[in-house]
Amino acid sequence: MIPPELPVDAALFLDFDGCLVEIAPRPDAITVPPDLPGLLHRLYHRQNGALALISGRDVADLRRYLPDFPGAVSGSHGAELSVAGQPVEAAHDLTLDVAALHRDAARLCAAEPAILIERKPLGVGLHYRADPSLADKVAAMAAELMARYPGLVLQPAKMAFELRPDGVGKDKALTRLLSMPNFRGRKPVYAGDDLTDEVAMLEAQRQGGFAIKIGEGESCASYRLPNPAALADWLTHAVLGVGTTI
């Protein structure tokens, strides 16, 4: 079901991979559509600043791809937050030897070159998109790492398993942002594509807004669009008031 028009008084929350950009074989191989930065700027002004990215990527990585993004950025599944270009704030109290975690992940995965290790400031991602038959093995490796590093939890994702700090999540990131001045009193609209987005979709709907699932797969979202290009069309319609190609 195609979503309704985006209300001017909504707070808009967007995932990044699979939502604003197409999924790539490697996290560092994504391509940012040339019109996306300008579209996000127009959305920011249309929503009077109530625009945020909520992603599993860390804030620094998101800024590398969208250096001039004016809205709030919540990274690492809500464990990091940066508003109005300010330094990153932690949303957790985890003490973690990240270098040791990354070394252990590399050792566990050494015999399977198809597994891609995504080293994150607050965790690690194990991607098996190159060989989907490795799903069970990667899940076991991630579980072993979780047992060694208290304070981390296992987060299934698309063709990946991630370890992230316990006590954070995209739903908590959304709730935290809704308490801030640009977002307070607005109804949340959340768009995402992955299992990690479902809790935030539920929270947006619970708080009187709506959610949009991008792509295929089961979802709690009331609305759906087929791909990032369709979402960009829907957002363009919001800021320009023109017809879409959906």
Image (cartoon, rainbow, N blue to C red):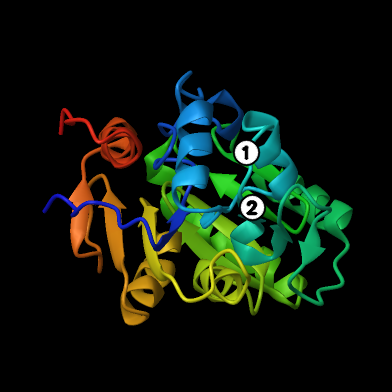
As helix, strand or loop, the secondary structure at mark 1 comes to: loop
Name above or below for residue 7 compared with residue 67.
Answer: below
Label 2 secondary element: strand
Q: Residue at x 57, y 34 (%)?
A: 27
Rendered location of residue 202, percent (x, y): 35, 74
**Residue 88 pos. (x, y %):** 80, 56
- 10 Å neighbourhood of mark 2: few (<14), some, or many (≥20)? many
Q: Position of residue 208 (x, y in %)?
A: 31, 78
Residue 239 visible here: yes
Residue that mark 1 sits on:
69
Q: Choose between 11 and 168: the one closer to the eye.
A: 11
- Give the residue at mark 2: 73
Q: From this view, report whether residue 153 is shown above or below residue 141.
A: below
Q: Nearer the viewer, mark 2 or mark 1?
A: 1
Amino acid type of the residue tagged 1 in the rendering: Phe
**Is residue 109 found left or right of 101 in the rendered image?**
left
Q: Is residue 167 above or below residue 187?
A: below
Total residue callouts: 2
Q: Position of residue 1 (x, y in %)?
A: 11, 54
Tell which of 30 and 154 is nearer to you. Answer: 30
The quadrant of the picture occupied by the C terminus is top left
